[in-house]
């Protein structure tokens, strides 16, 4: 496999040099940016300019992208595979812009990796192809020979290697249980369980153990969550009903105990919106199998587990399920899927604005100035409640695909001539500036149009 | 103090300084030779390395490093442990390598024992294909048995070793590993310690001990239990185990192993149970996954010997007890031993030679592989030892042979076949009936005196009392335990061996 590296920083500061050494089936590796001839020789990596990048047959390459501001190029190049290396917002960057486009890059990527455990957990709630590029195991889990060099792989390097290989060599027997995703979750679970024994009074360690157990579908999650909740109360952190207690409802839903799940959600429902949701849940609880599935999906949604909710909703066919799936696609930044689903719904007449609630006003989650999408462990805003207006989504995608005029038209359509449009255009300008800034930084003085 | 005495002290001090410098210099030179791979192994005839192949993704690298860093006098025998292992793919990569042979996988046959039986060198190393070695590993592993000949088993430090020998490390690459290994070799040169048990991926074994202890018990399923069991059996044979401090080997771990939260699966749980049963250990849920060993090995019963070599379940192990009733000369006894051993067609025999110390007829003759010589003092212990052979040596069948009697080449083979197809506990060869027709037992209820040299019995029983018979040329007789059934096998009409099973209590014996 050939690789193209789209970095956030210059080669000298590139953080994933070892990862490049360990790439499976490594053929040609190109770095988009300046490298000295000596560095190219010693690393076996070719430096390419932006113009050269576009002259390559990208269908034969896998992109390794570590800045969301490469997203327009990723979409233009159409590579064989896109691999996103997700990072927390670096110092000096606009965090709202960074987080939004990072989430879009992650959703677009065939595989994502991150050294941030927070991002790792958030992505686990949105998708399957995510690897935590760090670990705590002091052992070697594999080897890789490249010419005269023999490398030993740590646990996450071995997992990353396997995940990359499986992009083009899918396993004969697929299944989450035996796959690398579950293996890494189990590694993390084992680590946090051992940490709980070492730090019995630390609520966050128990919460993380519960989170990993939950992701693995292990019923022991509730024990660790209960311990975490009790420790939070003991430490006088009383505002943990949303962040901690509500999580019980997701665990119960995974176990299939819907009655328990609804009751636990009800305890945490304070706002009018939450109480309305709880009433809806009660109604579904007394319904049939389809309603129960909707209920399960809703419990996962209110617990920010978009991946689990989408899995259920994509199997259901009713208009209610499709509307919720649409909202969840938006909430998990799968915006192309959202638009596609909306078009299908328009075709069969279930996409009326009053049905989706997406046509008439601009939501806030997906545009600059909005609070970030909450993470698993401590977000206070309920997930997906403030959905983005569809024309904004459409406009953002136009912008990313380089269709600037279409983007402006979409933004104008969504906001009219009021203040919202100005905000959208400001974000557009920020994005364009960030892209130019990135190119300048990485290409080190190369001129850009 | 006289001036002369002061001179003498000065001379001694100077000599000590010179000696210290010289020792340090010699140590430096030794380290140099070792680092450069210029030292031969401290053992004649080289070493056999038996490599268990389980990890196709690592095995080629493991073999390459072993061939590169073990010296020219090693011989490698690689044994696939699963049917799925891509042996052809691997062997093609090493087709020009004269010191490496492969034993193909054979279902139901634990070929590690066979590979170890092929080891003709005075030391063998059993290791997994996830072990990565570096220069000097083997030479240094060989020193503890040279320092203390009682040491028969040595393990290096590694992440898969247990207890003090466990060292959990990760290296970015081989250059880091070899730098660390060289540093530790230099820093801890010459150090080793005794160990209670070993259980890691790499084990050096003295062949002499291997022949006494026998093979590894594959019925324990889990490798660490198989290794620990063998180590305990080695200790019961009087051997010491050692952990080498300067040798570190890098062991790779499968991803799935690190992901285990609740240790174990069905087969490893069964292995754990079998191990606990074998060593009479209490089942303790708190210790699940941890290796328990008996506190006092001397209180444990002797464990059955697992044969080395190529034997399957279809060829059960037979312990053949040879006793000498007469005072033979050394030359005669040696010749007789050879005749008996080479004359039998049955392939899976452990020979146990029982002698009384009064007899000079049994010199220190060589004992092969799992065989044994039991020396007792006086007639009573001699008879007692003969009665209790099955408790000492586990096997499917026990056959008694007199050094003075003649046996045809299929004698043992026939008795085993008869015992396999009958319900009798003890079988008496019918040749005896032809020789002593008057001694055939009737149904009269008189005490039976069965000629010991024609007896075979199942394992796990004490066949009865053995006593001297007066008036017979062959003078030992078995008075069978009345609870056991006795059958007779032979060819009275020139036909196939047949058997009449008898009911317990000595009644109903017969001939089929």
Image (tube, rainbow, N blue to C red):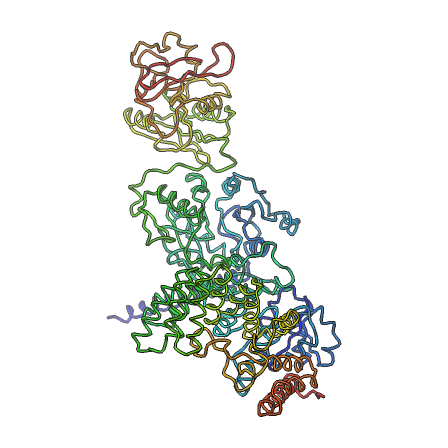
Q: Judge whether A89 appears above or below A219 on screen.
A: below
Q: Give A316 or B226, whichever is nearer the viewer.
A: A316
* Residue B462 drawn at (x, y percent): 33, 27
Work out which residue is located at the far right of the displayed protein and give it.
Answer: A55
Q: Is residue A276 visible?
A: yes
Q: Judge whether A71 appears above or below A160 on screen.
A: below
Q: Give B230 or B27, whichever is nearer the viewer.
A: B230
- Image quarter for residue B7? bottom left
Work out which residue is located at the far left of the displayed protein and give it.
Answer: B1
* Residue B133 drawn at (x, y percent): 52, 58
Q: Is residue A331 left or right of residue B145?
A: right
Q: Judge whether A374 appears above or below A192 on screen.
A: below
Q: Is residue B380 left or right of residue B429?
A: left
* Residue A374 drawn at (x, y percent): 48, 77
Residue at image coords 50%, 54%: B138
The quadrant the C terminus of chain B occupies is: top left
* Residue B5 drawn at (x, y percent): 28, 68
Q: Give A221 or B474, whichever is nearer the viewer.
A: A221
Q: Is residue B173 visible?
A: no
The quadrant the N terminus of chain B occupies is: bottom left
Number of numbered tags placed on the structure image: 0
């Amino acid at each position: 496999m050939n690789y193209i590296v789209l970095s956030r920083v210059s080669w000298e500061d590139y953080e994933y040099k070892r990862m490049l050494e360990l790439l499976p089936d490594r053929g040609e590796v190109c770095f988009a940016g300046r490298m000295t001839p000596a560095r190219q020789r010693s690393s076996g990596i070719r430096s390419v300019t932006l113009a050269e990048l576009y002259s390559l047959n990208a269908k034969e390459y896998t992109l390794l992208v570590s800045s969301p501001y490469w997203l327009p190029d990723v979409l233009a190049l159409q590579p064989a595979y896109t691999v996103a290396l997700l990072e927390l917002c670096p110092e000096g960057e606009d965090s709202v812009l960074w987080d939004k486009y990072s989430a879009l890059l992650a959703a677009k990527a065939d595989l994502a990796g991150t050294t941030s455990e927070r991002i790792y957990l958030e992505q686990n709630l949105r998708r399957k192809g995510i690897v935590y590029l760090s670990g705590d195991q002091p052992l070697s889990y594999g080897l890789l020979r490249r010419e005269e060099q023999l490398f030993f792989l740590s646990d996450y390097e071995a997992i990353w290697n396997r995940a990359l290989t499986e992009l083009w060599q899918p396993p004969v027997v697929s299944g989450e249980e035996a796959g690398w995703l579950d293996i890494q979750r189990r590694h993390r679970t084992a680590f946090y369980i051992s940490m709980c024994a070492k730090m019995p009074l630390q609520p966050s360690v128990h919460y993380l153990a519960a989170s990993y157990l939950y992701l693995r579908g292990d019923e022991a999650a509730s024990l660790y969550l209960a311990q975490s909740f009790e420790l939070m109360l003991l430490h006088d952190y009383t505002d943990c009903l949303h962040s901690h207690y509500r999580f019980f409802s997701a665990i119960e839903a995974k176990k299939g105990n819907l009655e328990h799940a609804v009751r636990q959600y009800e305890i945490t429902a304070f706002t009018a919106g939450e109480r309305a949701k709880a009433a809806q849940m009660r109604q579904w609880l007394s319904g049939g199998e389809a309603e129960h599935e909707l209920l399960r999906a809703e419990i996962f949604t209110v617990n920010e587990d978009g991946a689990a909710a989408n899995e259920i909703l994509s199997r259901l066919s009713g208009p209610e399920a499709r509307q919720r799936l649409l909202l969840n696609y938006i909430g998990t930044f799968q915006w192309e899927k959202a638009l596609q689903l909306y078009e299908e719904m328009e075709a069969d007449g279930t996409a009326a604005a009053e049905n989706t609630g997406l046509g008439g006003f601009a939501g806030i989650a997906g545009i600059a100035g909005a609070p970030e999408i909450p993470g698993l462990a401590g977000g206070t805003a309920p997930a997906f409640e403030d959905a983005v207006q569809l024309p904004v989504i459409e406009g953002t995608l136009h912008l990313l695909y380089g269709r600037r005029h279409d983007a402006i038209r979409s933004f104008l359509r969504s906001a009219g001539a009021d203040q919202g449009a100005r905000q959208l255009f400001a974000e557009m300008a920020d994005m364009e500036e960030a892209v130019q800034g990135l190119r300048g930084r990485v290409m080190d003085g190369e001129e850009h149009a | 103090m006289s001036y002369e005495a002061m001179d003498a002290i000065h001379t001694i001090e100077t000599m000590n300084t010179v000696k210290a410098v010289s020792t340090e210099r010699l140590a430096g030179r030794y380290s140099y030779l070792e680092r450069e791979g210029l030292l031969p192994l401290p053992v004649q005839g080289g070493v056999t390395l038996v490599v268990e192949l389980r990890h196709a993704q690592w095995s080629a690298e493991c073999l390459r490093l072993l061939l590169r860093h073990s010296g020219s006098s090693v011989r490698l025998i690689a044994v696939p442990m699963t049917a799925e292992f891509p042996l052809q793919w691997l062997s093609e990569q090493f087709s020009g390598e004269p010191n490496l042979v492969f034993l193909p996988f054979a279902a139901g046959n634990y070929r590690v024992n066979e590979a170890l039986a092929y080891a003709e060198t005075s030391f063998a190393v059993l290791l997994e294909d996830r072990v990565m070695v570096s220069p000097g590993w083997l030479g240094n592993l060989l020193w503890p048995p040279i320092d203390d000949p009682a040491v028969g088993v040595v393990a290096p430090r590694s992440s898969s070793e247990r207890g003090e020998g466990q060292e959990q490390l990760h290296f970015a690459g081989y250059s880091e590993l070899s730098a660390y290994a060289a540093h530790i070799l230099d820093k801890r040169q010459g150090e080793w310690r005794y160990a209670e048990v070993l259980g890691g991926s790499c084990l050096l074994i003295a062949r002499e001990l291997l022949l006494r202890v026998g093979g590894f018990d594959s019925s324990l399923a889990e490798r660490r239990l198989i290794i620990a069991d063998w180590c305990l059996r080695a200790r019961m044979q009087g051997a010491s185990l050692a952990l080498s401090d300067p040798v570190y080997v890098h062991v790779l771990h499968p991803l799935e192993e690190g992901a285990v939260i609740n240790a174990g699966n069905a087969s490893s749980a069964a292995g754990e149970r079998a191990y606990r049963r074998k060593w009479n250990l209490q089942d303790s849920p708190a210790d699940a996954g941890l290796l328990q060993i008996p506190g006092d090995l001397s209180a444990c019963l002797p464990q059955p010997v697992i044969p080395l070599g190529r034997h399957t379940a279809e060829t059960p192990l037979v312990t053949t007890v040879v006793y000498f009733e007469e005072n033979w000369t050394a030359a005669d006894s040696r010749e007789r031993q050879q005749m008996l051993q080479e004359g039998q067609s049955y392939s899976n025999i452990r020979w146990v030679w029982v002698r009384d110390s009064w007899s000079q007829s049994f010199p220190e003759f060589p004992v092969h592989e799992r065989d044994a010589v039991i020396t007792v003092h006086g007639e009573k212990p001699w008879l007692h030892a003969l009665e209790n052979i099955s408790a000492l040596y586990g096997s499917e069948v026990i056959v008694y042979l007199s050094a003075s009697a003649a046996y045809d080449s299929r004698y043992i083979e026939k008795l085993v076949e008869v015992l396999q197809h009958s319900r009798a506990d003890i079988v008496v060869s019918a040749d005896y009936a032809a020789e002593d027709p008057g001694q055939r037992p009737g149904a009269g209820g008189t005490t039976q005196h069965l000629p010991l040299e024609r007896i075979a019995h199942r394992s796990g029983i004490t066949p009865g009392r053995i006593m001297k018979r007066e008036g017979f040329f062959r003078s030992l007789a078995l008075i069978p335990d009345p609870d056991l059934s006795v059958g007779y096998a032979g060819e009275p009409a020139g036909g196939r061996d047949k058997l009449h099973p008898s009911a317990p209590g000595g009644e109903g014996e017969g001939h089929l």
